[in-house]
Image (cartoon, rainbow, N blue to C red):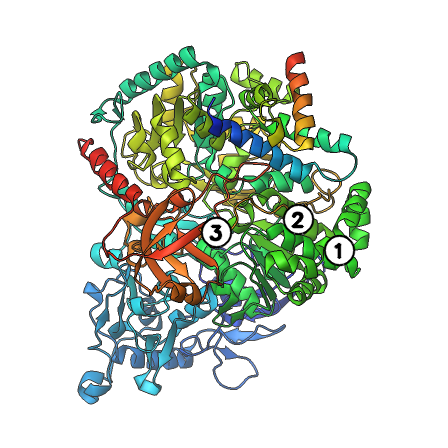
């Protein structure tokens, strides 16, 4: 295959080129320009800066205000060069390279000028380099050395004492970094990073001239400002002005290991900066293709949970949950668990046990758990937490497009013209991608937000939605049908694309269906609450505005018609020809780090790895041959079915790896009843989570820092997870599963996770060319990665759909049975917030709780006033499933009739409220629609009955641990 | 058999019929529901609902009923 220079991929991510690469189309026709720098010929794409061109030639022009994650700024005057035939000394960062240019980056005159500039900087900078936290990693110090500064004639302190910044106070309000203004050189890099990289605009430069200083908001402390603690400013700072507290405390790292974040489905690449086997900092890696060097408050800073005192590192067993735990060896725990599981199967039948894999664990680990269930338990009762989030994505996209995955890369957003965000809140839940999306919007892309709440994207700094379609929860299908109706009835469909790429008969059946008046926006307005004119405008924009892309989240899937909405979204993309190229597509934003991977690895009860149905004889033959075991051809129980059967009494044993169903699954009382009915509940986790409180066997797990493996993010990108510290329990998670399987009588033989991946690749056509060696070489690979696509597949369905022809599925709007009544007149929808992650087991054990220490109930001012509720009041939240108490937050982000809360804190019991309604196709719970009532409580300390029971039970269970 | 589990199964069968059992002929609608339930429901779930469907016949919608009768026949034949 021919290779053409691509500035995006052919640059060394360890080098700071000073300015970003030029936008460049890496095709044979694209031309490079040639210039001379210090006598060296350099060929670069047009639009490259002189500074960047020099760096490509290995010539590092001194700089302070420039860094290649930010646009050139030209303020520090250190990067001056001379250009033949031009007057003066232009800044190399802001000067574009031109063909034939002859550049001198160094001579006596330039050197003198640079020393003079540097002398001025240093005149207002503390000379405490030896005790400075940036010692060893300070660009100012490096540049002073590079320009040869030997003397500072202007001692600001004595000349004009009141005009120096040497006595500025430190701002230590942020728990993760310190702002030491005395070290600031006002290079603007932090301000620009906050604007350009993060898109929050929390920082500014206040005052003028020598008085200029960096200011969060209106001279606020960082914690009181709009700062979201993403770390971009800290990353960009060339001095010790913005510095991680951990580095101030412990000093500079001595080595780094590149690994993958274990939080959301963006899958950011990080450098784990180490001192010995201690992680002292996580810095976003510029070479990471998912995050391109950016981070959020979770991945960047919230890693302290890995060594938190709550970690349980010894296996424990007990006969019943009203007994204390007994610490045992791994061998004893495996034997205890295996004996019980075998006894249960003997007594209640082969189908009476099963397992749950985790989207937080690696591909290799989830693969082993599903293998254990199918091979050692002898049934297909394996499911994954994707059941309760993106299972409708798997079903819906497989049905329509032919593959259970998103179609794009994250980079694709840079080429999009119209972004439609449906039921997703990227700036909170997928913040790094949210920032990239905001950047594209600032560049001019149009934005349609479909959400019951007014999320940050609707009206943020320099980002405003062109349409906010504020629908009522539970009416997604009516909305998506109305969009399609407008496009069809106004003749805006991509007829050629459909004729060439989609099933003709199915399309015509669907077209007749969707053209019916009942799907018109004028009719659906009564359900959705969206004015018909808005729908018509948004549909026209999406269909005709250029590259149209859809990004969606759990606001789509977690409904009784989650699968229908996913299919409706795929219909819209096919209808408008927005599939199969950069800038378009259907993009499910996955909640957890390895949701995609856990699904890929055969965690669903009806599918073997690679989404192949268990009933297929040929596929079973393949696995039976490799695993040397007979497989059950029948699909197994899904999580919700397991819990129903447990309550009923026919399901008695469960192996749960890295998942907390007692907190995350809906209708907590039902889940608890099911767990109490278990005779052998095995929980493998790093903490005694809520589910473990009902367990009989606790197998200590390991964090992502303690093991090798891979995660697969929302863009199908398989990225390495690398062990940087020894596993605290002594075994890595995959080894624990091997031990349990052996005790069950089914021995598996692997010496390293790479061997597990080799087996996955051998059995899964979409993974067949994935190896650890390739991952080390490439950094990451997007599946399908096989002989046809050896370098992976960034964009799917390019020349045709995976299923052959695209399938337009009929999506009738069937209203949810969960309806408001006089008793429960409001609709509750749940979600998450930036600083916390899922059930909070990790982030609650970090300083991230400084931002979100408790779950609150967001309520519209009118609904609040009707009930006499003010912000901070304790309120009861009740549904037909249960009730709980929490504090109110009156917010005009809500629409009347809709309330919202998060589920990060177990004592809140948000899922005590949610019901057992679920998606028709996949049983994904309907978290997003629960009819509730909210009342102000008279007592300021009252807990609900469930909360009292929870507190008592938790106290008892913690006392049962002998730490 | 708890009423809870069975009532869930009946609700799920009705939901499937309402969502997928649409368009074209009744025969096709029934077929789609049969295919879906057979592909995604565990055997004990299919056995339970089929064993109890007569008792709860009035709670099932017509397409779901026909689909479950066909599934019942398939189970007996297996």
User: Could you classify mark 1 by the number of other residues whose Cα lies within 10 Å: few (under 14), some (14-19), or many (20 or more)?
Assistant: some
Which chain is mark 2 on?
A
Mark 1 and mark 2: span between their CA atoms? 17 Å
> Is residue A222 placed above or below A526 in the rendered structure?
below
SS type, badge 3: loop
Residue pointed to by mark 3: A288
Residue B55 in the figure: left or right of residue A913: right
Q: Which mark is residue A834?
A: none
Residue A253 in the figure: left or right of residue A373: left
Question: Which residue: 37% across, 68% down?
Answer: A226
User: Could you classify mark 2 by the number of other residues whose Cα lies within 10 Å: few (under 14), some (14-19), or many (20 or more)?
Assistant: many
State which quarter of the image contains the N terminus of chain A: top right
Comparing labels 2 and 3, the label whose residue is closer to the camera? 2
Residue pointed to by mark 1: A517
SS type, badge 2: helix
Q: Position of residue A730 (x, y in %)?
A: 28, 29
**Mark found first going from the N terminus, 3 or 1:** 3
User: Could you classify mark 3 by the number of other residues whose Cα lies within 10 Å: few (under 14), some (14-19), or many (20 or more)?
Assistant: many
Q: Residue A494: which quarter of the image?
A: bottom right
Residue pointed to by mark 2: A568
């Amino acid at each position: 295959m021919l290779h053409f220079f691509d500035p995006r991929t052919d640059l060394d991510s360890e080098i700071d080129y000073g300015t970003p690469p030029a936008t460049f189309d890496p095709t044979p026709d694209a031309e490079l320009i040639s210039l001379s720098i210090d006598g060296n010929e350099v060929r670069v794409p047009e639009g490259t800066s002189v500074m960047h061109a020099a760096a490509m030639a290995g010539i590092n022009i001194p700089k302070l205000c420039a860094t290649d994650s930010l646009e050139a700024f030209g303020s520090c005057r250190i990067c001056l060069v001379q250009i033949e035939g031009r007057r003066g000394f232009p800044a190399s960062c802001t000067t574009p390279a031109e063909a034939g240019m002859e550049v001198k980056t160094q001579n006596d005159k330039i050197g003198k000028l640079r020393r003079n500039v540097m002398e001025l900087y240093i005149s207002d900078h503390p000379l405490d380099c030896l005790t400075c936290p940036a010692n060893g990693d300070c660009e100012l110090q490096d540049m002073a050395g590079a320009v040869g500064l030997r003397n500072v004639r202007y001692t600001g302190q004595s000349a004009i004492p009141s005009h120096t910044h040497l006595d500025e106070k430190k701002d230590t309000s942020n728990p993760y970094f310190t702002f030491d203004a005395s070290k600031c050189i006002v290079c603007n890099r932090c301000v620009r990073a906050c604007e350009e990289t993060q898109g929050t605009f929390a920082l500014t430069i206040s005052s003028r001239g020598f008085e200029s200083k960096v200011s969060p908001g209106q001279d606020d402390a960082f914690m009181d400002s709009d700062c979201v603690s993403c770390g971009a400013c800290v990353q960009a700072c060339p001095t010790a002005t913005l510095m991680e507290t951990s580095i101030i405390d412990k000093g500079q790292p001595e080595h780094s290991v590149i690994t993958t974040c274990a939080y959301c489905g963006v899958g950011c690449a990080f450098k784990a900066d180490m001192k010995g086997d201690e992680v002292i900092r996580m810095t976003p890696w510029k070479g990471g293709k998912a995050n391109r060097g950016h981070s959020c408050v979770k991945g960047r800073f919230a890693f302290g949970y890995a060594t938190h005192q709550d970690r349980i590192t010894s296996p424990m067993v007990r006969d019943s949950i009203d007994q204390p735990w007994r610490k045992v060896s791994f061998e004893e725990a495996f034997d205890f668990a295996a004996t019980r599981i075998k006894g249960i199967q003997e007594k209640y039948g082969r189908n009476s046990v099963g397992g749950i894999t985790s989207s937080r664990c690696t591909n290799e680990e989830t693969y082993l758990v599903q293998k254990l269930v199918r091979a050692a338990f002898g049934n297909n009762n394996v499911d994954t937490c994707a059941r309760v989030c993106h299972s409708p994505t798997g079903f819906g996209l497989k049905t329509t497009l032919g593959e259970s995955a998103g179609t794009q890369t994250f980079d694709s957003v840079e080429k999009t013209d119209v972004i439609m965000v449906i039921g997703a809140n990227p700036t909170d839940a997928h913040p790094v991608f949210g920032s990239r999306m905001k950047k594209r919007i600032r560049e001019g892309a149009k934005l349609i937000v479909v959400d019951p709440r007014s999320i940050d994207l609707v009206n943020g700094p320099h980002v405003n939605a062109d349409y906010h379609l504020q629908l009522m929860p539970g009416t997604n299908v009516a909305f998506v049908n109305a969009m399609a109706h407008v496009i069809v009835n106004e003749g805006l469909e991509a007829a050629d694309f459909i004729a060439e790429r989609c099933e003709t008969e199915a399309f015509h059946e669907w077209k007749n269906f969707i053209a019916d008046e009942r799907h018109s926006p004028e009719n659906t307005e009564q359900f959705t609450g969206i004015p018909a004119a808005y729908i018509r405008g948004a549909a026209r924009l999406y269909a005709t505005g250029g590259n149209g892309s859809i990004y969606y989240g759990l606001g789509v899937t977690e409904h009784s018609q989650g699968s229908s909405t996913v299919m409706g979204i795929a219909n819209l993309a096919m209808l408008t020809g927005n599939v199969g190229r950069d800038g378009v597509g259907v993009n499910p934003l996955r909640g957890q780090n390895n949701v995609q991977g856990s699904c890929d690895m055969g965690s669903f009860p009806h599918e073997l790895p690679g989404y192949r149905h268990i009933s297929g004889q040929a596929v079973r033959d393949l696995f039976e041959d490799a695993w040397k075991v007979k497989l059950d051809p029948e699909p197994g129980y899904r999580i919700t079915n397991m819990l129903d059967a447990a309550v009923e009494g026919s399901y008695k044993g469960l192996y749960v790896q890295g998942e907390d169903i007692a907190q995350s699954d809906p209708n907590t009382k039902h889940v608890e009843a099911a767990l109490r009915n278990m005779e052998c509940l095995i929980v493998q986790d790093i903490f005694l989570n809520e589910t473990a409180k009902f367990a009989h066997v606790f197998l200590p797990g390991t964090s992502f820092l303690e093991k090798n493996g891979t995660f697969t993010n929302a863009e199908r990108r398989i990225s390495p997870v690398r062990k940087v510290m020894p596993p605290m329990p002594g075994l890595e998670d995959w080894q624990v599963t091997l031990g349990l399987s052996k005790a069950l009588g089914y021995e598996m033989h692997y010496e390293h996770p790479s061997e597990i991946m080799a087996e996955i690749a051998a059995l899964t056509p979409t993974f067949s060319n994935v190896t650890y060696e390739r991952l080390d070489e490439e950094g990451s690979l997007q599946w399908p990665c096989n002989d046809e696509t050896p370098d992976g597949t960034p964009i799917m369905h390019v020349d045709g759909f995976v299923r052959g022809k695209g399938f337009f599925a009929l999506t009738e709007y069937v209203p949810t049975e969960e309806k408001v009544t006089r008793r429960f007149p409001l609709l509750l929808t749940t979600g998450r917030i930036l600083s916390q992650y899922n059930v909070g087991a990790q982030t609650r054990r970090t300083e991230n709780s400084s931002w979100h220490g408790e779950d609150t109930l967001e309520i519209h001012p009118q609904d609040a006033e009707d009930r006499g509720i003010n912000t901070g009041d304790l309120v009861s939240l009740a549904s037909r499933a249960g009730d709980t108490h929490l504090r109110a937050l009156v917010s005009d982000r809500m629409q009347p009739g809709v309330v919202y809360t998060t589920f990060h804190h177990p004592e809140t019991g948000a899922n005590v409220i949610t019901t057992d309604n679920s998606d028709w196709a996949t049983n994904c719970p309907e978290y997003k629609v629960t009819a509730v009532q909210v009342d102000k409580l008279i007592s300021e300390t009252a807990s609900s009955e469930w909360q009292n029971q929870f507190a008592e039970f938790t106290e008892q269970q913690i006392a049962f641990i002998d730490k | 058999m708890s009423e809870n589990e069975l009532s869930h199964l009946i609700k799920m069968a009705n939901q499937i019929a309402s969502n997928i059992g649409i368009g074209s002929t009744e025969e096709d609608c029934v077929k789609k529901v049969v295919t879906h339930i057979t592909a995604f429901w565990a055997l004990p779930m299919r056995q339970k609902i089929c064993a109890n469907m007569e008792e709860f016949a009035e709670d099932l919608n017509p397409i779901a009923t026909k689909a479950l009768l066909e599934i019942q026949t398939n189970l007996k034949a297996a």
